[in-house]
Amino acid sequence: MEIDNGALENIRAAQNPDGGWPYHKGGSWTEPTVYALLAHQAARTTAPGSAGALAWLGAAQQNDGGWTPRPPVDQSTWVTALAAMLPPETIGAQRHARAVEWLLHESGMESSPLFRLSSLLRDGKLPEGPDVSGWPWYPGTAAWATPTCLGILALKKCYWRRPSSRLRERIEKAQAFLLSRRCADGGWNHGSARSLGYNSDSYPETTGQALLALAGTDAGKLQDSFRLAQRFLREQRSSGGAAWLRLGLLAHQQTPAGAPLFSMPCRTVPDTALTIMAAAAEQGYNVFLE
Amino acid sequence: MRRRDFILGSAAALGLAGCNRTAAPPRSPALVKVTRAAAYSQDLYDTMRRVLAAHKLNVRGRRVVLKPNLVEFEPESTINTHPMLVHATLEAFRELGASVAIAEGPGHRRCTLDLADAAGYFQTIPGFEDLFTDLNLDEVSRVRLPHPISRLSSLYLPRTILGSDLLVSMPKMKTHHWAGATLSMKNLFGIVPGGVYGWPKNVLHWAGIHQSIADLHSLFPNHFAIVDGIVGMDGNGPIQGRPKPVGVIVSGQNPVAVDATCCRIMQIEPSRVAYLTLAGGLEGIAEKNIQQIGEKPDSVATRFELIMEMRELRRERA
């Protein structure tokens, strides 16, 4: 596939000497580094600096198998799901397996047995069923939409390579979490559909991510979500949001509306990379679902 | 403690103590200025010059970081600190000889520059992108909390903030459905990096919202506060509330005193806002310990509607 507007070149130019990528400028972070590599994969080419990038990522893996968002942070977080989306043959099979294990052992605090018990004692009822479980941004906190979507996408890739009931069950619990957190307007907020009796408003980015993570589920239940995603696309004011919406809609064979790709400024490396990935998806190659 | 950690002392060497060093020392009683400002108009430029002059800030040659509250895309709403107030403040600090930057790390939306663009910052503030740092994605250092009230023992914080001489918190005057009111102290949630902790910054919620606000305050006890109360937000704030015209700017170097004064203007009883008493104690928020200059709070007080869960915060006027 050819990306002919210099977007890939812009990504390459932003690579830091240490091999990683910044969000905008400055030090390297795990998220933009993974997205830069995935954008090259989507364009079916290899990043000239991929060896340096993979070395940088390798150094960012923690002893527990998870990934830190960036040094000097020494806590594994949600970005582990991103690293686990990279092919094992690039990131290293052992590194990859340890990342997947980290994901399988992590979940939002609200689904922990202790929290569920304390909720039962306090409120006289359980917050959610045992078959609902997402991922948090940061260990020890609640599950939210974005890390849950990314966790699903990472584990799905593993499942397609090597199916297992353990992976399938974790994916299904996370998808149940997403469906339980859908807002009244059909989309997704960052993860709380209602607060103190008020409906939360959905966001474009999380709505696109959730649709992508729900690829392969019953589309009949997602018609409101498709309509909202199309409306968001027509009103879109961020390239990252537009890219996620397109990726999500295309995952359900929905034709995206709205302005063409690259018509909005890509202000960060992830914005540019996601726009490239959305362009590839429009041409039939959705890197998140391969 | 690891070498790379910023303990409070070393952080102070970089900037926290700078807040004390560069601005006027805290006074007793705390000085708070309530200034009438009817609208977001060109008059704000002169108003902000007068506001800073009243506080006698010495910032010549110092690095000042303005930290507005950016939340959502809606430029027509009152959800974000108005860009014209930020620009007027920037110009006023520059006239005092400071080097001024703008920084924010929104807690809900990740596309900060797009958000700032939609909120009118690019259009209103020349060279905005060069002045601005997205605190969610900034370089970070770990800062240990010396005496944590929350469950947190340390936080990663952005070096743009740690390296500043004076942090200026510029919130919108809003109700908050969890905290009661979101003002200059709650606005510091925006310096906690989403790139590390996520969107929302849920570690602060799990550690206790009020306690986390008090802990952040303990790291920046003398940040300067300028509260945008020209048009605030009441009801189900800080996102889904309604515009609430008040016509004031509230400023001062003691954030507890500034926020307590804002609560009185909003007809919220400050002693019932847990983070204020955690951070300042009843003495810190007592009217007798706050020297009001400019308008008297009672003369501009406006009843902010509160959601049912927050009605016990209501301050009944004598």
Image: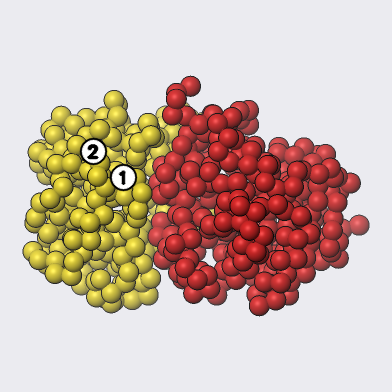
Chain colours: A yellow, B red
Farthest residue, direction right: B318
Q: Is residue A273 above or below residue B144?
A: below
The residue where tag 1 is placed is A28
B254 on left or right of B297 = left
Inspect this view and state whether residue A228 appears: no
Mark 1 residue type: Ser
B197 on left or right of A135 = right
Q: How dense is the environment of label 2, judged by Cα within 10 Å: few (below 14), some, or many (20 and up)?
A: many
Q: Residue at x 47, y 50 (%)?
A: B135
Q: Residue at x 34, y 63 (%)?
A: A267
Farthest residue, direction top: B1
For the residues bearing labels 1 and 2, Cβ distance under 8 angstroms: yes
The residue where tag 2 is placed is A56
Q: Nearer the viewer, residue B111 or A256?
A: B111
Mark 2 residue type: Trp
* Number of numbered tags placed on the structure image: 2
